[in-house]
Image (cartoon, rainbow, N blue to C red):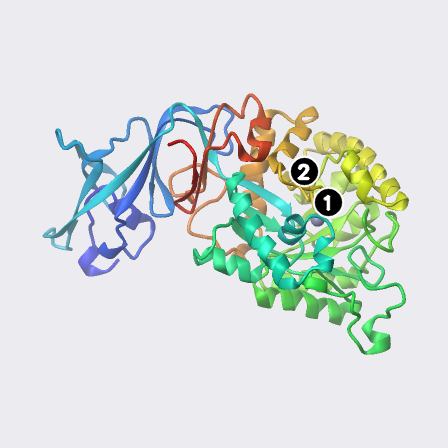
Amino acid sequence: MTHHTKRLFGFVAAAAFLAAPSFAQDIPAEVTLFQNVDIFDGKNEEMLEGHDVLVVGNLIHRIAEDIPASGTYEFEVTTGALHRIETLPGSGVNGYSVTILDADGVQTETREVAVNVIDGEGRTLMPGLIDAHYHLMLAASQGDAWRLEQPDYTHATMVVEANNLLQRGFTSIRDTAGPGFGIKKAVDEGMIPGPRMYLSGTLITQTSGHADRTLPFEEPRVFSGQVPVGEGIMKLDRVVNGRDEVLAAARQNLKQGATQIKIAIGGGVYSLYDPLDVTEFTEDEIRAAVDAASDWGTYVTAHVYTPKGVLRGIRNGLRTIEHGQLMDEEAAREMAERGVYLITQPFEAEENLRALANDIQWAKYMQVVEGWQRTAELVRQYDIKMGFGTDLVFSPATNHQQADFLARFGKWFSNVEMLRMITSNNAEILALSGPRNPYTQGALGLIEEGAYADIILVDGNPMDDVSILGNGGANIPLVMKNGEIYKNTMN
Ligand SMILES: [Zn+2]
């Protein structure tokens, strides 16, 4: 700590305590105080009833009963201890007076800090929602429409969708294939509204693999020396074979800011070429992706359904598995032993999906729908760590009602378990990106002092009924991300 800011007195001083170095210019002109809320903190089934939450800058600063909206406060910067509260009588103005002292305890400056008071009126306050398996581009363009559009049109739809996510209550997404690095930058700069984004970049797949979108008669580069026109459209996926090409593809994603690497190691439902039962990428190819990622301190996840694929993946270093609906007992046990997270989807036989699929795709889809029933039992039996990710790329209706999807887990999981999935469990998955995590000032998915101020207010209690988080965010009147309010329909 620098000599002239050894001690900061005042309510806001603790913000400096959390984010050294502490300069007077870091003290914000306004802070936000949520009053009279019941708090789900992202973990505990017992809610904190009738509490207040003070947000300073982009972090949650204090959680307590009856935090006053005006007054003079003293904080010891080094310990955070509160020494004195003295409410200014009859001022009628919400605000704090902050006194800044130098190292010798001499007053150098006084600042007025306005307080934006939000009366929660007994609503639930909880962490912003997280989707750990999302595809911003596919969700925005609804199905395959992006194939026929100009790239800049598709990018425009992604910008709109980024804001829609926030309005539905989602303050973070993990994008498991597709473009978005520029949009993420614009969001982080505050240029456009959107959630925090953990991007994988292109989905890395083999020739004939789940994400091989080349035309049937197009040959891999190794034969033709040319990049097939169907490859890498809109940077959704990249077709590679062999250790060298996997390394290059993974490193290209890392170069652009990928927080994790995604590979496809087994057949897919809506794939063009591969049956569900096939296994993709050799051990050496999977290891190549893991080598590239771990050299950058991060991890690899994979699209895969079958037990053979799951086992090959986790035995070669994968930290999370996407889907996994056809896994067996051996795969489940080993996932639990290795502490691998499962991000899966309780898909159902929806009419609108039937219309989008050909007969082969639909037969594969129904296999996955039925497989999930068994997988759910295995998840419970072996207590596999679960994240929440929708992957609803084909159905605009459900895609835009993202959190409704959560309630489908209700047959197997309690309300608090489902709420953890969409908050703190998913935040643990995001944190697997280690030094590649772009957001490290505070915790995500939690309501605790020092955590990021990613907060939603909910009409009603999701601990009684998680489905109230759905319906396009209709019961979520307020959304805050990084300390800024992006939605407030309460006034
Ligand atoms: Zn997906």
List x then y, in percent, for residue 284: 78, 63
Q: Closer to the camera, 360 or 205?
A: 360
Residue placed under numbered mark 2 in the picture: 397
* Residue furthest left in the image: 106
Q: Give the quarter of the image for residue 375.
A: top right
Residue placed under numbered mark 1 in the picture: 394
Q: Residue at point 70% right, 30% down? A: 380
| Residue 266, label in figure | none
Give the distance between the C-alpha atoms of the residues marked 2 and 1, in whole angstroms. 9 Å
Q: Residue at point 25% right, 33% down? A: 69
Q: Closer to the camera, 5 or 393?
A: 393
Q: Residue at point 78% right, 39% down? A: 353
Q: Is residue 26 above or below residue 48?
A: below
* Residue furthest bottom in the image: 225
Tag 1, which secondary structure?
loop
The amino acid at mark 1 is: Phe
List x then y, in percent, for residue 115: 26, 39
The amino acid at mark 2 is: Ala
In what quadrant of the picture does the N terminus appear?
Answer: bottom left
Q: Give the quarter of the image for residue 307.
A: top right
Q: Is residue 173 above or below residue 258?
A: above
Q: Closer to the camera, 313 or 26?
A: 26
List x then y, in percent, for residue 467: 60, 27
Residue 327 visible to an observer of this rendering? no
In what quadrant of the picture does the C terminus appear?
Answer: top left
Residue 64 visible to an observer of this rendering? yes
Tag 2, which secondary structure?
helix
- Whether residue 67 sits left or right of residue 460 in the image: it is left
- Whether residue 449 sits left or right of residue 200 in the image: it is left
Q: Give the quarter of the image for residue 389.
A: top right
